[in-house]
Image (spheres, rainbow, N blue to C red):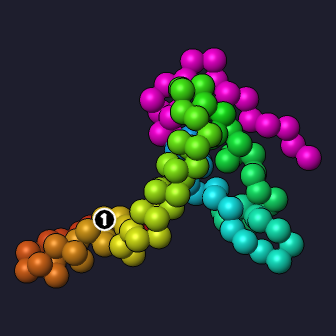
Amino acid sequence: MLGDIPVPRCVTAEHVRLAVKAVVVHAPEAWPAGPLCRADHTPYPCRLHRWGRRVLRTRGLTDPAVTELAARGQSAWVNEPAGRGRAARGNELAARGRAVRVPERRR
């Protein structure tokens, strides 16, 4: 088993942004064997979820506040429209009647 990911000495806004994403993306999911991480299917809480909670605790958020944040973020994640990215944005604008050319990525 791997150890926990260390919390940086100086927690920046970028660390907080990544911690919020880690807490939301690595949320628990009910399985017959018990709760598993939704992102990597390891026993919940996974390493990234624990790291995200610890980072947010260093910035003064309480455990109930982090849980509420994860719940709100998860509902936003679930309700997010499908197809994110440049091509999806072009399709969205085209559907509104605006002509948009979205360049294809070169491979």
Q: Vertically, is 12 above or below 69?
A: above
**Is-magenta flag for residue 16?**
yes
At a point 16% along the width and 82% down the height, the residue shown is: 95
Q: Vertically, is 24 above or below 91?
A: above
Q: Which residues are magenta?
A: 1-18
* Front one among 73 and 62: 62
At a point 24% along the width and 77% down the height, the residue shown is: 91
Residue 83 in view, yes or no: no
Q: Vertically, is 55 above or below 81?
A: above
Q: Quadrant of residue 3?
A: top right
Residue 59 in view, yes or no: yes
Rate crowding at label 1 as few (under 14), some (14 to 19) or many (20 or more) other CA atoms within 10 Å: few
Residue 81 percent coordinates (x, y): 36, 73
**Which element is circle 1 on?**
helix
Residue 73 percent coordinates (x, y): 47, 56
To which residue does mark 1 refer? Answer: 86
* Front one among 8 and 75: 75
Left or right, 62 with respect to 28, comes to left
At a point 66% along the width and 33% down the height, the residue shown is: 54
